[in-house]
Image: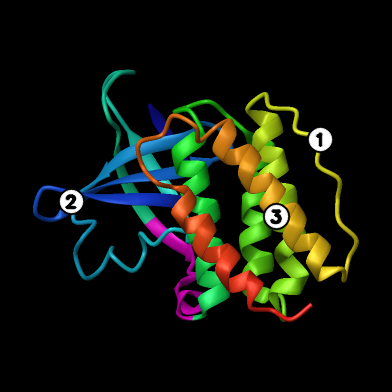
Amino acid sequence: MNLRAPALVCAVRGHGETAVIARMLTCEAGMVAAYVAGGRGRTLRPVLIPGNSIEAELRSRSEGQLPFARIELVRSRAPWLAEPLPAAAIGWVTALCATVLPERQPYPALYEALGGLLEAVCMAPSARSWAIPLMSFEVLVLRELGYGVPVQRPQDGDWPEILATFDRLGRELARYPLADRRENVMAARTLLRERLGRIQG
């Protein structure tokens, strides 16, 4: 692999004393896992936050080798991680992508949709503005993975119906792409649901 491209950080796991394995979504190569030297250090740790937009340079000597990555920050979403609802939404959608998308299979529609959704979560005045787009993104994930789930779009402003649709979608996600996962990824969605439930209808 020899690629320089914009990417969205979806997950980061420590590797050794100072490095990390970062999973990032690119338009051209899909989900890519890469070794980032010094990823736990003072300089790169704030860059490698799930939800951040980065420029990634990925290099590997063979197709089966884990690529090495050099990264540069393009857009930080760290300020919104101090806000309970945006933090829960960002945590959920990035964990979902990192878990269910296969390695190195392009999903350009998902890449564009995830970037737009993250921007909406950060810039919208409240969760009422991005709850339906978030569910539309989940439906897109299901469809891109081959699960044709019939879920009707709720009416704007009907908060009880929005929450009911959110619950139905959660059951479909747990039943299909997340059914055999060892990690409890749905815990991130449960946290988001609890926080959305506190909004008065």
Which element type, helix, strand or loop, lies under badge 2? strand
- List the single residue furthest toward the left: 17
Q: Residue at x 71, y 31 (%)?
A: 143
Q: Residue at x 58, y 33 (%)?
A: 175
Which element type, helix, strand or loop, lies under badge 1? loop
- List the single residue furthest toward the right: 155
Q: Label 1 is placed on what type of residue?
A: Pro
Q: Nearer the viewer, residue 96 or 34?
A: 96
In the picture provided, is 88 more to the left or to the right than 65?
Answer: right
Q: Label 3 is placed on what type of residue?
A: Phe
Question: How far apart are the alpha carbons under marks 1 and 3?
Answer: 13 Å
Tag 3 near tag 2, CB within 8 Å: no
N-terminal of the pair, mark 1 or mark 3, is 1
- At which x and y percent is residue 166? 70, 55
Instruction: List the residue tagged with mark 3.
Output: 166
Q: Nearer the viewer, residue 26 or 83?
A: 83
Nearer the observer, disc 3 or disc 2? 3
Dot 1 surroundings within 10 Å: few (below 14), some, or many (20 or more)? few
Q: On the rendered image, what quadrant is the N terminus found in?
A: top left
